[in-house]
Amino acid sequence: MNKNSSNIMALVPNTSNKRETVCIFGTGDFGRALGHKLIQAGYPVVFGSRSTQISSLIPKDAEVLSHAEAAQKAAIIIIAIQRQHYNFLTSLAEVLRGKVLVDISNNLKINQYPDSNAEYLAQLVPGTKVVKAFNTVSAWALQSGTLDASRQVFVCGDDIEAKQMVMDIVRALGLTPLDQGSLLAAQEIENYPLQLFPMWKFPILLSLGLTAFFFFYCLIRDVIYPYVYENKDVSFFIAISIPNQICPVLALILLALVYLPGVLAAIIQLYRGTKYRRFPDWLDKWMLCRKQLGLVALAFASLHVLFTLVIPIRSFVRWRISSQTVSQALNNKTEPLNTTKAWLSDSYLALGILGFFLFVLLGITSLPSVSNNVNWREFRFVQSKLGYLTLVLCTAHTLVYGGKWFLSPSSYRWYLPHSYMLSLIIPCIVLVVKFVLIFPCLDKPLTRIRQGWERNPQYSE
Amino acid sequence: MNKNSSNIMALVPNTSNKRETVCIFGTGDFGRALGHKLIQAGYPVVFGSRSTQISSLIPKDAEVLSHAEAAQKAAIIIIAIQRQHYNFLTSLAEVLRGKVLVDISNNLKINQYPDSNAEYLAQLVPGTKVVKAFNTVSAWALQSGTLDASRQVFVCGDDIEAKQMVMDIVRALGLTPLDQGSLLAAQEIENYPLQLFPMWKFPILLSLGLTAFFFFYCLIRDVIYPYVYENKDVSFFIAISIPNQICPVLALILLALVYLPGVLAAIIQLYRGTKYRRFPDWLDKWMLCRKQLGLVALAFASLHVLFTLVIPIRSFVRWRISSQTVSQALNNKTEPLNTTKAWLSDSYLALGILGFFLFVLLGITSLPSVSNNVNWREFRFVQSKLGYLTLVLCTAHTLVYGGKWFLSPSSYRWYLPHSYMLSLIIPCIVLVVKFVLIFPCLDKPLTRIRQGWERNPQYSE
Amino acid sequence: MNKNSSNIMALVPNTSNKRETVCIFGTGDFGRALGHKLIQAGYPVVFGSRSTQISSLIPKDAEVLSHAEAAQKAAIIIIAIQRQHYNFLTSLAEVLRGKVLVDISNNLKINQYPDSNAEYLAQLVPGTKVVKAFNTVSAWALQSGTLDASRQVFVCGDDIEAKQMVMDIVRALGLTPLDQGSLLAAQEIENYPLQLFPMWKFPILLSLGLTAFFFFYCLIRDVIYPYVYENKDVSFFIAISIPNQICPVLALILLALVYLPGVLAAIIQLYRGTKYRRFPDWLDKWMLCRKQLGLVALAFASLHVLFTLVIPIRSFVRWRISSQTVSQALNNKTEPLNTTKAWLSDSYLALGILGFFLFVLLGITSLPSVSNNVNWREFRFVQSKLGYLTLVLCTAHTLVYGGKWFLSPSSYRWYLPHSYMLSLIIPCIVLVVKFVLIFPCLDKPLTRIRQGWERNPQYSE
């Protein structure tokens, strides 16, 4: 090597031509898959196992030794065994002193043990540097190389240097390490792969509850009432007509619920005269799941669009139109065009189309890869300005469509108003309050509060 | 620590068990939020403030000192104060010498000051290493942890080492640093969060202008003309019929405008006989906003699809079909099936469906996360081959649909041709020129020019 | 620089205030574009060229020297020349000793040479450290800065230190390096930019084959048969009616083919009593292209939805409905509502809508940016549970729609059953086998096998 490059060498000291040996305790599925990947990435791998006999499943280039011997060969030891078997590590305490132990274990249930596996390990073998990592990656994904699911590896640990060493290995495997802080975060990291859409729980439960309520509500009004009073069997309404009432109602209510917490927060801030006090817990939680609420609302809106567009193909609708036309022909009369009706019909359709279009736009901008490419101002413009416009258009769509029923007494069956009327309550409240809030007498103090001004400053800077 | 791991230590010298102290000047919203995050990530944080009295809002583990004392404790000082108050830093010049100053400030308007805040800071306190960073992140996003908007932190600075230190902090906070070069880039970085979709401005203004033009054009032809000559009130056409003329017309024109600059560029290159001369400025700009033009075109196409699919639900359409049927029945005649009409109707619908389908495919591949996963050849195949196929299908769809009007004199009202005819001009030009360009006598020299050949080489290698 | 920051310096030794000089051999398009970018990122750049005369196209701040002189100035030499001209490098062997040579070349065909260009280079100039990189980036993208296509730069090489140096440069240019291991990977990296959707080949060829088969099948049954026996010309069915038979049939068959390999794998594992033996090669390949199969199925399903929704606008359909109504009116009879028919029509529509909705949901979660944000359990929940639900809904949709034809002899034309019947074969097999597999007597041993249990353990741990 000539002079020229030797001084470069000095500038890149944290790499060398040979990567450090990594030791893996345990030769199960995940241990083997990880060993295989590490060897591919250029790390010498040594397995620590009870039986040092080499199985055909263990990667060829790996060594298999007893636990103690293997541990001595490496500074990093990946513990690919289950928490129940951690006990035997106490006997190796002397060998493990000062080593980096990587806890990759997962539990079967959320909060299965009072302490996290990683903290348990750290307390079991003091004098070691425990790092939690790799538990979010599946053995199958590692082996097949098709990491369709997340490439993110959460890493936490108390020793920054040890954490850095583990994060370098993660990067070398083509994965993305995410530093989650100290070992206290291990509990959360261990719970992560067991979670099933935690942010979606509330929106989905809420919408299921509302769906059930409106289903029975519509069933009573639209199927049971005509059966009782007119002896008409329209039970087939259950398939399309009733879902097509539930979907728009839920879409509108959920969309309004996305903007309600913002309006409530503004009222609370105006009332308190400061932004430096925490919102009540329920409001905080509500605000954090607004995106999910909005996407569930979009799902209902999409279903509503599909249910509406198939209307003319429905056998029942074809029969109804055809029999109306036949009766007109038989009565020898032609109806003139009702311009008002044409206006109403066309405007609620146009409002609905525009509202749905903007709604889909909002949905697209909430895709992670799209929202990563806009700046904060653009994101707020889309989610706030376009969002309110969507709400206004959808509310107007419902008002124009359902408005005619407000004054007609025949639309109250068993004193139950039409579901459209119920769906308008929350959106109208949100829009009215929002409209009031943009009056200068309220908007000015609110803006000042949000910039840090306090009406009764009780916290000094 | 035993021998084994100590030699690893030497190989990872740029981490230590303790992270370096970070100093923050200013205890406003952003300063506190950043301090909070830094403490979470394991950095000792010290605030520099006029009043050293600890406010309840300042993170608990942070120290609050006078500016001078705080500055002495750290090598990196984050300046979380506004440009107007930078002056007082001159008095600290001695303490700040050699330190890394991180300018995180934003302005209220684009190009508010002649120089960027970071350059102003560097000139104000010479002897320091100024790095611009963090200005694209919002305090709210930092605090709530919901970084839905961008995780990207643009970093620039003249001192590479200082920049590296700041980028390490950015990474430790779970954000993605993007090195933008020297401090000259600060102006652009400071303007970035104030931008509102700059690449979209031209496509959106253009489409708004065209929308307005075609709206009045259609209004005159389709609403005012029948009112004047036939005294028919079809004002409700404004809601759906006219938008459903504007949308396809704009979709087609904008789609053609996506491919027009490529065709123009080819002509210019053929004429000049070299690719080594810059295109005119307007052509360069046009080529850079092709993606946005295409997406706006897709938006209009989607609206066109929705407006078309609701046709059979429209009150007016139902009335028209029903009255036609009734009059047929009253006149006691049944019309036979017109096979030509059936062919025309079915083919323009099929062409439109296929064109729209490919158009949506193009839209999906322009999503950042999708286009990141294809190689250059695949990207060009989709955007060029599939793109032209889309244009051909959409033009054919319009030709088959609107073709019948070309020869009928009744379709010229007040000498105004149908809007479909206007919409076909640009797409047909693009397709004809493109068709001419794929003839070997033109394609061969063009390919050679694009590979670097020059007809009149005036630039030597 | 005061004491405080000097000890920080020591902790960040791998950066310095001046970046190392990079040498580029060759002044072609890519060499110049790369040189330009490197200068922007702060690297001093020196070009090695046959003629050292400075061309106006070479970036201003770059030096142009003879190859030998240029090489002496830098530790990293980027070889921006074509493989055919590598020979002259042998004469520079002495100067190049110990240097890092970056091979950025691409071929014109997949596997054009028996060995990769990078390996050829390494064998040609021994004593150098060859790194493969940058071949996936286009000169045009580098120059224009619009890296819409991939920012990923695959890097491979036998020397870890050299690879690290190249990866640092890649990062400094704002690109993402991906370490692909040793130089053996070069062949694959060189083939990558020449690939055209390799994973999509099989699904697309399969669907094209099936499309052709079903097209002629439907043509015979629906166009030729009525022409021969009833002398009816319904050739316009080719535009919409027949595509709308092909699309749902293909969507259903392809969707079933996504789940068939999983079912086959379960049977094989149950039969073998172990999961530790490789599946046959065809099954492995099939499992790896399930995502692509599913997306092609979704494309056909979307086309089916569009073709279905335009039904009421079709001229032929309007004529048929109108003539039916007229004949009813002329015969002076009104048909009563057929509730069974209404039920059937509404339920298959509702089933289809729900199935399509879930199908789109599956498609959205397979977007890279979405699947990166879910954990393994969530990904499997969506792709497996929701996937099977989609298959059940779509099969039920087809059964309810086409069921009536199974028993009617008139639906067998020339002994050919309706295409719907053919499409149901594979989905029904998959669903029946899956249903059998969830019985405890089969599910329990399967789960144990998948957790690592073996019926006849022949591989020791």
Image (cartoon, coloured by chain):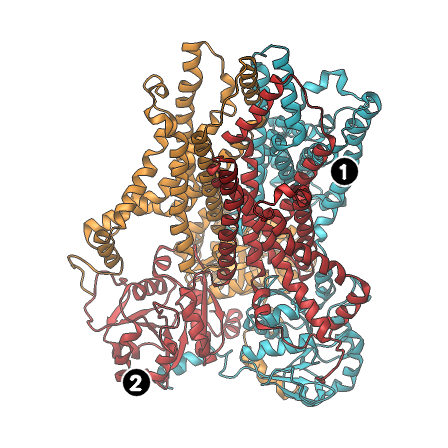
Chain colours: A red, B cyan, C orange
Q: Are marks 2 and 1 on the same chain?
A: no
- Do we see residue C172 in this rendering? yes
Give the structural element (helix, strand or loop) at label 1. helix
Q: Please give the residue where the numbered disc 1 appears in the rendered image.
A: B210
Q: Is residue C81 above or below residue B332?
A: below
Image location (x, y in percent) of residue C210: 39, 30
Q: Position of residue A371 (x, y in %)?
A: 60, 57
Quarter of the image that includes the C terminus of chain A:
bottom right
In the rendered structure, the answer to whether residue B429 lies left or right of residue C179 reads: right
Q: Please state the horizontal and vertical placement of residue C250, each as a whole percent of the image.
A: 41, 34
Give the residue drawn at x 50%, y 29%.
A315
B449 vs C386: above or below: above
The x and y percentages for residue B83 are 78, 74
User: Decide: marks 2, 1 in contact (CB < 8 A)?
Assistant: no
Name which residue type carries label 2.
Ala
Crowding near pointer 2: few (<14 within 10 Å), some, many (20+)?
some
In the image, residue B343 sits, relative to residue C282, either above or below, namely: above
User: Residue flagged by tag 1: what amino acid is it?
Assistant: Leu
x 45%, y 50%: residue = C117
Judging from the image, mark 2 belongs to the subunit labelled: A
The residue most toward the front is A229
Label number found at residue A93: 2
